[in-house]
Amino acid sequence: MPQGLDVGTMNLLSARQDGNETVFVQQRNSFVEIDYSDMAEQMLSRSDVLHIRKDDRVYIVGDDALNFANIFSEETRRPMQAGILSSDEQSAIPMIKLITEQVVGQPEFPNERLFFSVPADPIDADVSTLYHQKTIESLLTDMGYSPEPINEGMAVIYSELANREFTGLGISFGAGMTNVCLSYYAVPVMKFSIARGGDWIDEQAAQATGTPVDKVTSVKEEDFALNFETDVGGIEGALSIYYDNLLDYVIENIISEVDEEDVEEGLDVPVVVTGGTSSPDGFEELFAERINESEIPFSISDVRQAENPLYSVAQGALVAARSEEEREGQNEQAEESDTTAE
Ligand SMILES: Nc1ncnc2c1ncn2[C@@H]1O[C@H](COP(=O)(O)OP(=O)(O)O)[C@@H](O)[C@H]1O
Ligand SMILES: [Mg+2]
């Protein structure tokens, strides 16, 4: 059975079909490095914490990293930054490899197909996604998979717009990036990313209010809503300002990236928003309001949020992998019947 994998700055998620159900496995894309000690040894031997030991250092990866960081007063680190492998983190590749192995597991058979998400090149940062893509690809090949990249925005179209003939605008608001894709009948006509997302909102709001970033992130994830109540000077007020700013920035860039020739006249397209950053109450309404009052060069039928904002990219990668497999199956059958006909 094929698999889908969402490779995100904050979360790695796999999706696999099990009968009628889709099973997701998720880990934080994060790790912590601590000194090896008797206490560390005891804590590690008691549980199934994902870790590796290297001489007198221990690396704990995934969801447990944060707990260990708190207990041992260390900071968590991340293999990725702004949507791609971090060039400032020497341990990025071995760490993301461990987390990926845990999330995707062993292939069920050699060269099992696996589609993994990759961002489009960002239009506002001078980085290429190629090195990131090729590195992830070779890690997955080493694990015994047959990997194939799929654009993250296109994965959103696959998971959310199957009943709209894979036509629409898909936007994934992640931690490190925002990915945008416009597709007509499963053909992407525009795709790009911007190097801003939830992390950017957190950093800006932290700076503006003089609050530690982690504090801002927890306020945002716990009970923050994008309503019209004002909280002048507070953390929530600052979060609202930067949310607003991010939405306008995304819409502005859609307008400047869309080529009018690519737009199908007379077709109203649906818009789907997803990703962890789209979670707060009021996000969907705010985005709908902003895009409807903008000068966007195509007409929009409706704006909605994905049912599971954290799962839709992995789900879409799985849908793409399965449809590729079906297509191949059909080709093989066609070839066989050609041979019989001869
Ligand atoms: N309930 C929530 N409210 C607001 N933001 C959230 C919530 N849950 C997660 N996030 C934010 O979503 C981002 C992670 O989303 P995700 O789609 O997994 O990103 P990535 O694909 O980049 O790893 C982080 O910035 C996180 O703070
Ligand atoms: Mg993601």
Image: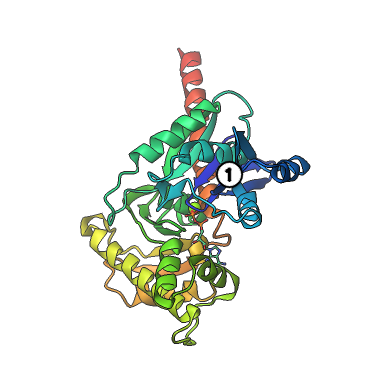
Q: Is residue 328 above or below residue 252?
A: above
Q: Residues within 10 Å of mark 1 (few under 14, many from 20)?
A: many
Q: Which residue is mark 1?
A: 14
Give the x, y percent position of residue 102. Answer: 62, 39
The image shows residue 186, relative to residue 251, as above or below, that is above
- Left or right of residue 245, residue 335 in this image: right
Quadrant of residue 148 in the image?
Answer: top left
Name the residue located 66 percent from the left edge and 55 percent from the top edge.
71
Q: Label 1, secondary structure: give it.
A: strand
Q: Quadrant of the N terminus?
A: top right
Could you tell me which residue is drawn at 44 percent across and 69 percent down? 302
Q: Residue at x 45, y 36 (%)?
A: 136
Q: Nearer the viewer, residue 32 or 49?
A: 32
Q: Is residue 48 left or right of residue 24?
A: right
| Front residue (pair 203, 242) | 203
Residue 75 sits above or below residue 207 on the image: above
Which quarter of the figure is the C terminus placed in? top left
Which residue is rendered at x = 42% and y = 64% of the image? 271
The location of residue 289, given as percent across then percent down, is 40, 77
